[in-house]
Each structure stands twice: as structure tokens, then as C-alpha cells.
Amino acid sequence: MIKLTFFSFLFLAFSCHAQTIMKSDTALIKEHMYRLTKTEQYRQYRNVKQLDLTADYILQQFGKYSDSVFLQEYQVGDRTYSNVVCSFGTRHSKRIIVGAHYDVCGDQEGADDNASGVTGLLELARMLHEKPLNYRVDLVAYTLEEPPFFRTELMGSYVHAQYLSDQKIDVYGMVALEMIGFFKDDKKTQDYPIGILKMFYGGRGNYITLVKKMGGDPFTRKFYKAFKKAKTIRTKKFAGPKSLPGIDYSDHRNYWLFGFNACMMTDTSFYRNKNYHQKTDVMETLDFQRMSQVINGMLISLLKMK
């Protein structure tokens, strides 16, 4: 018979708790960012070979932690493009989708847009491994989010959302990780689509935002509550009409189109990061510590969702 001393019990309890609150690793974040952005060619739609290499890297990383990993391939003319999907908690039927696009707009590295979001997926895959979940969680890296495919049925997220709809899969909600690495504490570093919003949200780009459309959405409400309660990073919520510029500028828009609850986690994109769609969008401009805090908040939220 094994005797547990009081201190042994405390050690075991602490170890279990530490496992539950596993944190993202900034060294791994930097490694993923480097592998995604410092490539021979840019990750844009014309460079199919580079997109395939990026998809292979994501697939390899997902495969370290998930037993359910696959490419969702589809044709655009004579070219084949791929979403990369992995799953956790597959015994559950109802699922949560967390997605981010890995392509870029034109000839630029696309560090914040959107290697940061994809890196979030890669770290979440590592941290979700063998964790208890109340829902199935699918992590999806999308292709072809950027122009000339944005707002078309050829977006990778449109293809994925349509598949879920056609198969009548029970989706609780979706979160798009869209630019989660750029933060500034200085005054006048945060812009808004409507000037008066600065009165409510402030002029410093030092927070992460959950963006949703107006109206009732039980998933987004609960997810934001869990993320806010995690207290890993300064967090704000923004709800607006679908007509507001920027509110649907990512992959969550396609889940809205198919009637799914969806939201976007973002550093507010071009309203803060002036490197948006520029060659200056490089990993050296990002705040890896706060990016890590966003990922930690995502993990805690996914684990706590009821």
C-alpha cells in the first residue's frame, strides 16, 4: 500500500493543476513564426508550391498532437489548394471551430496577417493534446482568404463552412484568429471605423478584441465571458452591424453565411497595425509575449466552455 504524506499530496495536486493551466511557449511561437514567414517564396495564391509547403508544415505539427488530421483539398481551375484540419475531443458530436488563414496578400511575409493566427492554432494543438473537453474542437488552417478570392466561394473557409452545412454537422460556434500579435502602449496607436468609438475603447492599441455582429449569439457570449474571466490579457468586445467596415474581414464571415454562430479574435488589423498588407509586416514587429497571452486565453476558454 502506498502512503501519501501531506506534502506528497500537495505536490500531486500542484502537478495536476499545472497541467491544466499549461501555457504557450514564446520560443515555440517564434520558431513557428520563422518557419511560416521566412520562406523562399511568399505564401500567396500564385505560389502554389509554397502554399503546399506551408500546408505540409501545419499538417506535420498538427499530427504530433492529434490522431485526426487531414487535408481538405479543392480545385480552383487546374490548381489544387488545401485547408488543413485537426480535431480533439472527437467523442463529442457538437463542435467548436477555431480557424486562421495561412495565405498572404501579394508579395509580403504576412507575419501578423496571418502567420500570427496560424501560430495560435499550432500552439493550441500542442496544448489541447489529451486535455478533457466538453466539445469537439476542430482547428482549421485555411487557404485563399486573401484577394482575389476574398468574398468569393473559393475562400478556404467558405469551402469548410459549406461542408459543415451540407453534412448537417452540429456546430456550437466558430472563432477566427485574425492578426493577434501587434500591440502598442503609446497614445494614438489605435484607430476606429467611427471616431466616437475612441471615447469608449481608448486610443492605445494595447488590447485584444472579440468582434461579433449584433444580435443574440449564445456561443459568442459564453466564449467571451470565459476569455474575459481567464484574465490573460486586456480584452474588449465589439458588436456592430455587418455593414460596418472591417467587422467581417476574415474567415468568420463565411460561417455567418451558413447560419453558424461565429466571431473574430483580433488586434483590430489595419485600425492598429499600419503594416497591414505591406512588406513591413514582419515578425520582428510583433509582441510575442502578448500574443502568447492571447493563445493562453483561447486555451482556457476552450477548456471551460459548457
Image (cartoon, rainbow, N blue to C red):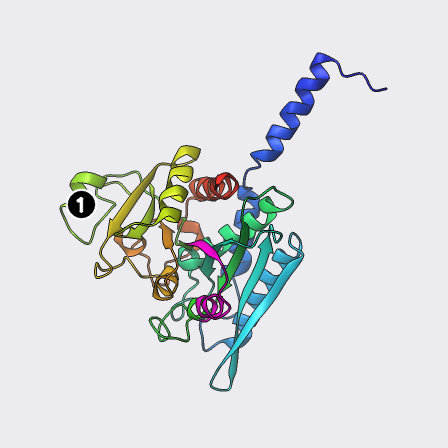
How many marks on residues? 1
Residue for point 67% across, 56% down: 67
**Residue lying furthest top in this view?**
6
Q: Residues within 10 Å of mark 1 (few under 14, many from 20)?
A: few
Between 290 and 161, which is closer to the camera in this rendering? 161
**Residue lying furthest right in this view?**
1
Between 145 and 275, which is closer to the camera in this rendering? 145
Q: Is residue 233 visible?
A: yes
Magenta stretch: includes residue 161: yes
> Residue under circle 1?
197
- Quadrant of the drawing holding the N terminus: top right
Highlighted magenta segment, given as a residue range: 159-175
Between 34 and 148, which is closer to the camera in this rendering? 148
Residue 21 occupies quadrant: top right
Residue 80, how many percent across, how many down?
53, 79
Residue for point 42% across, 75% down: 154
Horizontal side, residue 177 vs residue 213: left or right:
right
Q: Amino acid at mark 1?
A: Leu
Residue 58, how many percent across, how many down?
58, 61
